[in-house]
Image (spheres, rainbow, N blue to C red):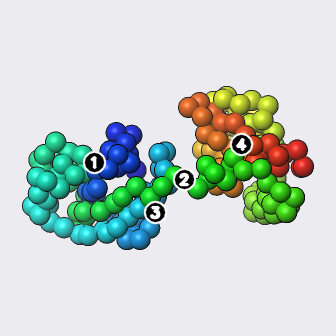
Amino acid sequence: MLFRTKDLEAIFAGRCTLAFRRWKKPTVKPGGTLRTALGMVGIDSVEAIAPDEVTEDEARAAGYKDRAGVIAMFEAQQGTCYRIRLHPAGPDPREALREAEPDALELETLAVRLLKLDKAAPAPWTKQALQLIAAHPGVVSTTLAENAGLERAAFKLNIRKLKALGLTVSLEVGYRLSPRGVALLATL
């Protein structure tokens, strides 16, 4: 489930407590959370509805000017209409993770995780990716992917795996190693 930046800002400011989507199958569940650019969003409920059930107040709580905006969005898409109740659920835990200095045991655990990622791939890639990012912070992913000999989409997927471990930080353009990533790379 994706949000526009202005909608995320409204969620984290407490102005937006609902979202409306039209899906063939819901992509979120009550009690779940979503990682977003501004932090975690908690999902309180996901309810199938008829388009005419949307009220003016609900439309405004979802960031729309009025009910007609929600109806227009529903009409432009296919699937079942859903009302999703949500709330800000705090910062992305990866932020604290990537800034923490890992101890020897954590470094060993991370090295094992990288080894598993390498074994699951056609060829080892984790150390090379960390080295590329360390040597070229802020360089566009297309260039990094070429240097790694990968398609951009495959490279970005790999970097998301490293980011989930708190090793990299996405920049407006490109990436940089987190303090955790720098510490790990020094041991590899």
Q: Which one is in front, 20 or 23?
A: 20
Check the image and report above or below for 25 versus 3.
Answer: below
N-terminal of the two: label 1 or label 2? 1
Residue found 11% across the figure and 52% down from its top: 56
Mark 2 element type: loop
Question: In the image, what residue occupies the spot 36% across and 58% down?
Answer: 87
**Real-space Cα separation, disc 2 to disc 4, in angstroms:** 15 Å
Which of pointers 2 and 4 lies earlier in the amino acid sequence? 2
Instruction: Find the distance from the CA under tag 1 to the CA under tag 2.
Output: 20 Å
Q: Can residue 146 be seen here?
A: no
Residue pointed to by mark 2: 92
Q: Which of marks 1 and 3 is in front?
A: 1
The secondary element bearing badge 3 is classed as strand
How many C-alpha atoms fall within 10 Å of the one at disc 1: few (<14), some, or many (≥20)?
A: some
Instruction: Point out residue 117 in the picture as x, y percentages from the top left corner.
Output: 75, 59
Separation (CA) of disc 4 from disc 3: 24 Å
* Among numbered discs 3 and 2, the one appearing first in the sequence: 3
